[in-house]
């Protein structure tokens, strides 16, 4: 457990160090969602229709921007070799890295969805459900993103390849998350999001660990 805690703390420190790298996706998300009302004008119905999918698309793109260096830096500086030699299973180490990314990026971004949703004319009574859906959705995005980041760890400038791998799997959370933000079948949509998040958390680290072992050979 000490190795997992050390991995979590190390990744969390790296994400918030170096100029606050975790703030970049948050800034992108807020910029994308807050500037749209200025561009679209004061028409409430138009904003209410465009807002839910926009929030989720901005969240997906913000996460996507964090994935390229998630394992690439470990491969370049030899940290991956230490992970493979660690007494802790590689799958659990990968899970710890994903948890650090969720805490550093996912949670702040989900909390930032509250003012973003209000700016996009979401009903105030839906804001708590939107924040909860983003917390689940970010876990799902990161669970899937671990796989894309691991597969492309040895590829220079692999951001486009990561997008090709993970974006099809981002579609279900975006669809059901937008349904929550739009007030449609909120309970059922949250249940589906929770199921997808649990599946991504369970299967993502296993698949990513297998890809990392191939990268180290």
Image: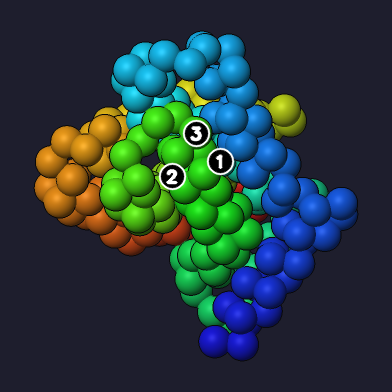
Q: For the residues marked 2 and 3, what is the alpha-carbon distance in whole angstroms?
A: 24 Å
The relative height of residue 179 versus residue 160 in the rendered view (above or below) is below
Q: For the residues marked 1 and 2, what is the alpha-carbon distance in whole angstroms?
A: 7 Å
In percent of the image, x 18 and y 45: which residue is there? 186
Residue 50 position, x and y percent, is: 38, 20
In percent of the image, x 35 and y 45: which residue is there? 124
On the image, numbered disc 1 is attached to which residue? 63
> Element at badge 3?
helix
Q: Residues within 10 Å of mark 3 (few under 14, many from 20)?
A: some
On the image, numbered disc 2 is attached to which residue? 141
Compared across the picture, whether 101 is left or right of 174 comes to right
In percent of the image, x 44 and y 38: which residue is there? 117
Q: Nearer the viewer, mark 1 or mark 3?
A: 3
Residue 73 position, x and y percent, is: 76, 50
Quadrant placement of the N terminus: bottom right
Mark nearer the N terminus (1 vs 3): 1
Work out whether residue 19 can be spotted.
yes
């Amino acid at each position: 457990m000490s190795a997992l805690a050390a991995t979590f703390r190390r990744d969390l420190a790296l994400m918030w160090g170096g100029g606050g790298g975790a703030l970049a996706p948050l800034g992108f998300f807020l910029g994308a969602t807050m500037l749209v009302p200025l561009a679209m004008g004061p028409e409430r119905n138009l904003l209410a229709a465009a807002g839910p999918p926009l929030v989720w698309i901005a969240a997906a793109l913000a996460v996507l921007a964090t994935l390229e260096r998630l394992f690439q830096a470990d491969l370049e500086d030899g940290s991956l070799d230490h992970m493979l030699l660690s007494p802790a299973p590689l799958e659990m180490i990968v899970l710890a890295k994903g948890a650090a990314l969720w805490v550093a990026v996912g949670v702040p971004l989900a909390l930032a969805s509250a003012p973003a949703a209000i700016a996009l004319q979401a009903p105030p009574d839906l804001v708590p459900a939107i924040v909860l859906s983003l917390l689940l959705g970010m876990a799902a995005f990161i669970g899937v993103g671990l796989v894309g980041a691991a597969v492309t760890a040895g590829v220079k400038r692999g951001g486009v390849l990561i997008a090709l791998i993970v974006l099809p799997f981002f579609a279900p959370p975006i669809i059901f998350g937008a349904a929550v933000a739009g007030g449609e079948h909120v309970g059922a949509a949250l249940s589906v999001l929770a199921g997808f998040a649990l599946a991504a958390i369970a299967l993502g680290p296993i698949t990513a660990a297998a890809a990392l072992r191939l990268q180290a050979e």
